[in-house]
Amino acid sequence: MKLDCRLMAIANLVRKDKAFADIGTDHAYLPVYLVEKGIIQRAIAADLRVGPLENARDAVVSYRFTEQIELRLSDGLDNFKENEVDEIAVAGMGGLLISQFIERTGWLKNENIHLILQPMTHVEELRKTIFDNGFIVDKEVVAEDDDKLYIVLSAYYYGDATAYTELDLIVGKLPHNDDSLSKKYLEKIYDKYNKKLIALKNAGKQCTELEQLVGELKQWQ
Ligand SMILES: C[S@@+](CC[C@H](N)C(=O)[O-])C[C@H]1O[C@@H](n2cnc3c(N)ncnc32)[C@H](O)[C@@H]1O
């Protein structure tokens, strides 16, 4: 199984020999890869819909991993029991949907559970949900496929809600990284907010807070 850079960035964060779940698995690329490489021994590949689970079944059968990879219909983690899994990937979905999974799955609040989250949208809102619910982000990675940048967050339950600023929600841990893709992502964020600022200024609008934010984002350019 060959993964694209986005899925590989997720796979690289998976701890060895954990009970793994892939939520919204579609073709089960991630669990198949992890079992094939011997990183995990067993996995649950879950999806909301039958069609994607059929795609997953095709991959699992063709790689002969039916003993190791269970297929499960589940809306988020709703059809999982506490203590079934401790390594959980949720990738390729919107940040708001991933936030809902976190908020309604109380048993995720366990220090032994590792969440690997790859939101396609609303990364700031997802960071806010993570912090407000007592999780910490220990690592963030940027991956690139076909000129698109993707953020992957690694999070653990910590207990206390983390204090954060608007800037923390926007840049996350990327300023701590020393790689070119994180720098590229920070440039992209700066451009986005700077364009917004220019447009507001041109429209004669007051924008002190945005001006300050853009000033702060400039430090990583
Ligand atoms: C774009 S695919 C991502 C597949 C794979 N995780 C990846 O990142 O390449 C999104 C998958 O999430 C599934 N999905 C959407 N909503 C879901 C939910 N509420 N619970 C579980 N899976 C869901 C879809 O059926 C689809 O298979």
Image (tube, rainbow, N blue to C red):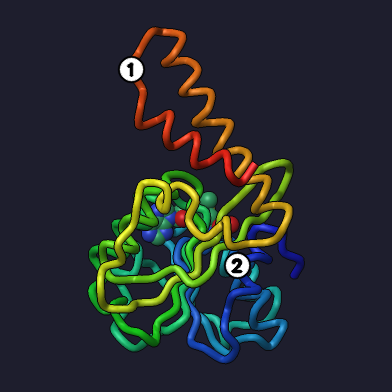
Tag 1–tag 2 contact (CB < 8 Å): no
* Mark 2 C-beta to ligand 1 under 8 Å: yes
What residue lies at 43% left-to-right and 37% top-to-bottom? 213
x and y percent of residue 131 in the render?
A: 32, 63
Q: Nearer the viewer, mark 1 or mark 2?
A: 1
Mark 2: give few (<14), some (14-19) or many (20+) Cα within 10 Å. many
What's the residue type where badge 1 is placed?
Gln
**Which residue is at the front of the view, 16 or 190?**
190
The dot on residue 10 is 2
What residue lies at 23% left-to-right and 65% top-to-bottom? 104
The dot on residue 214 is none
Element type at marker 1? loop
**Which residue is at the front of the view, 155 or 36?**
155
x and y percent of residue 174 in the render?
A: 57, 56
How far apart are labels 1 and 2 at the CA level? Answer: 41 Å
Q: Is residue 205 above or below residue 22?
A: above
Is residue 154 rendered to the left or right of residue 84?
Answer: right
Hey, which quadrant is residue 36 in on the image? bottom right
Q: Would you name the residue on which mark 1 appears?
A: 206
Hey, which quadrant is residue 102 in on the image? bottom left
What residue lies at 46% left-to-right and 23% top-to-bottom? 197
Of the image marks 1 and 2, the number of the one nearer the N terminus: 2
Mark 1: give few (<14), some (14-19) or many (20+) Cα within 10 Å. few
